[in-house]
Image (cartoon, rainbow, N blue to C red):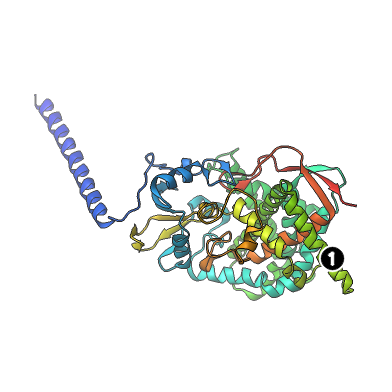
């Protein structure tokens, strides 16, 4: 009888404890509700995972996806959710997006999922904060400054574009995305590590990098056989390669090199680990997004012959004017500045294709914005594609229409156009990316016509990619 009584007492105490915890949670929830009475409407989704799976569900890159369309129609352009492991404010409002990006380090800070830091490195510019981020970014800005673009990078961009395009045979078929990646990887490899295109070590590093990138965009499942596990092995191989190059430079085995690695070794006080992560993040930033943007331009242009003709006219005029002045046929900075319609095509490609769709931020303190509460510690996601595809901002937003940028009278794209982010963390290589696209398009439209060889389209999962690599067939223009 005593044992039964003891069991009943324990059960009573357990129930009492559970009730007390529930009451405490309810009180805390009630206090939180009163404190944050201006929380945007929204849903929390499933326990633990929230709405992350729904948010990351694959969809065509030229749409904002079912999740965003559904939530915006139900709750408006600012709503709350639970994604990437915690409560979040999701913004499709251009004003709030600008407010978030312009208040970096004051009201908000960069806050990427831990698996991104693990694979890119804790010293990657993508995840660094404060003064260390400023230091790393200043190195990148020095590497990609306007002076560098004019004097060194632009001639090399043209050389590497021609290296790829002149290898295309009349009537041949291949994957446009692979060719775009060859172009951007060769270029960034040359200027970071003085690597020559087509050389065995360049091709070997590129293969490791492809494996690495597949892991960056995969689920963080770190056990043998997974893409994430293979990516971590490739990361280690890439870092060993970079470390070997550093040791050569420091021991003076090779001749003096005029590249980013040599500059960092001479002019910075970064540690070995910091230099390795910096070089890896520069390979990542300088290669992946630009190559996808070039593939997107090829994809969009194939379906728009009138745009291609306008592009051809602009570039033919440019070539004829140079010849009339007796100038060398190679492109220079003034030629690039004359590519007005080309920049419209680039802006429209970035608007409709949305290579960078959103960024991760976190509120550093309680923030109020136009009646909304953004609690301290909550994730904040400025979603750029939802703004770029907003019919209230862009007429017929799913249509590829470069002329819309002429109509706006603003080639910079206006305040609603943020393909490279904004604020103090705006992409350091945004001008380099546009120059690469412009030079590649210049030689492409003057020398080739093309068609889609096998049906493909850009999809988001979660980064923009072509499932089949965008197969095309090219024809040489006489």
Is 382 left or right of 441, judged from the image as shown? left
Position in image of residue 277 (x %, y %)? 60, 60
Q: Residue 88 location, x and y as percent?
A: 40, 52
Q: Element type at marker 1?
A: helix
What x and y, as percent, mark residue 274?
Answer: 58, 64
- Indicate the quadrant where residue 154 lies: bottom right
Q: Is residue 56 above or below residue 433?
A: above
342 to the left or right of 120: right
Could you say which is closer to the camera, residue 339 or residue 355? 339
The residue drawn where x is 84% and y is 43% is 172
Question: Which quadrant holds the N terminus?
Answer: top left
Residue at 65% in and 51% down? 400
Crowding at dot 1, Cα within 10 Å, few <14 / some 14-19 / many 20+, comes out as some
Give the image location of residue 58, x and y in percent: 55, 41
For the residue pair 48 and 473, the one nearer the viewer reads as 473
Residue 119 visible here? yes
**Which residue is tagged 1?**
319
The answer to whether 109 appears left or right of 306 in the picture is left
Q: Count numbered badges in the picture.
A: 1
Q: Is residue 375 visible?
A: no
Q: Check the image and report above or below for 275 versus 112.
A: below
Q: Residue at x 80, y 62 (%)?
A: 315
Q: Quadrant of residue 320?
A: bottom right
Pick the residue in front: 301 or 83: 301
């Amino acid at each position: 009888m005593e044992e039964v009584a003891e069991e009943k007492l324990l059960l009573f105490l357990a129930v009492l404890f559970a009730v007390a915890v529930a009451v405490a949670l309810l009180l805390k929830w009630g206090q939180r509700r009163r404190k944050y009475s201006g929380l945007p409407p929204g849903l929390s989704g499933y326990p633990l995972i929230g709405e992350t799976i729904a948010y990351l569900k694959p969809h065509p890159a030229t749409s904002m996806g079912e999740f965003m369309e559904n939530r915006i129609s139900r709750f408006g352009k600012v709503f709350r959710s639970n994604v990437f492991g915690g409560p979040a404010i999701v913004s499709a409002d251009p004003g709030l997006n600008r407010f978030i990006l312009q208040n970096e380090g004051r009201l908000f800070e960069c806050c990427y999922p831990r698996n991104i830091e693990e694979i890119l490195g804790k010293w990657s510019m993508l995840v660094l904060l404060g003064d260390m981020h400023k230091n790393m970014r200043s190195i990148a800005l020095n590497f990609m400054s306007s002076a560098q673009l004019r004097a060194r990078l632009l001639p090399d961009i043209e050389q590497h574009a021609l290296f790829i395009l002149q290898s295309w045979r009349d009537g041949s078929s291949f994957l446009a995305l692979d060719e775009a990646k060859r172009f951007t990887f060769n270029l960034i490899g040359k200027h970071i590590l003085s690597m020559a295109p087509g050389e065995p070590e360049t091709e070997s590093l590129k293969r490791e990098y492809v494996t690495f990138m597949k892991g960056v965009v995969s689920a963080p499942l770190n056990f043998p056989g997974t893409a994430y596990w293979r990516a971590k092995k490739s990361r280690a191989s890439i870092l060993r390669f970079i470390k070997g190059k550093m040791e050569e430079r420091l021991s003076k085995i090779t001749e003096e090199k005029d590249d980013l690695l040599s500059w960092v070794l001479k002019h910075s006080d970064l540690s070995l680990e910091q230099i390795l992560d910096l070089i890896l993040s520069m390979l990542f930033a300088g290669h992946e997004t630009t190559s996808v943007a070039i593939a997107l331009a090829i994809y969009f242009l194939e379906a728009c012959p009138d745009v291609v003709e306008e592009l051809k006219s602009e570039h033919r005029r440019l070539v004829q004017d140079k010849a009339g002045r007796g100038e060398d046929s190679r492109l220079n900075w003034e030629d690039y500045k004359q590519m007005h319609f080309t920049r419209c095509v680039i802006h429209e490609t970035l608007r409709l294709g949305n290579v960078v769709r959103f960024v991760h931020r976190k509120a550093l303190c309680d923030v109020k914005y136009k009646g909304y509460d953004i609690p301290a510690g909550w994730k904040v996601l400025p979603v750029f594609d939802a703004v770029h595809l907003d019919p209230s901002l862009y007429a017929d937003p799913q249509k590829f229409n470069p002329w819309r940028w002429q109509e706006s009278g603003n080639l910079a794209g206006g305040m609603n156009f943020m393909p490279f982010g904004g604020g103090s963390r705006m992409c350091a290589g945004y001008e380099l990316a546009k120059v690469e696209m412009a030079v590649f398009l210049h030689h492409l439209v003057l020398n080739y016509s093309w068609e889609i060889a096998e049906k493909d389209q850009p999809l988001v999962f979660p980064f923009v990619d072509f499932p089949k690599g965008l197969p095309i067939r090219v024809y040489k223009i006489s």
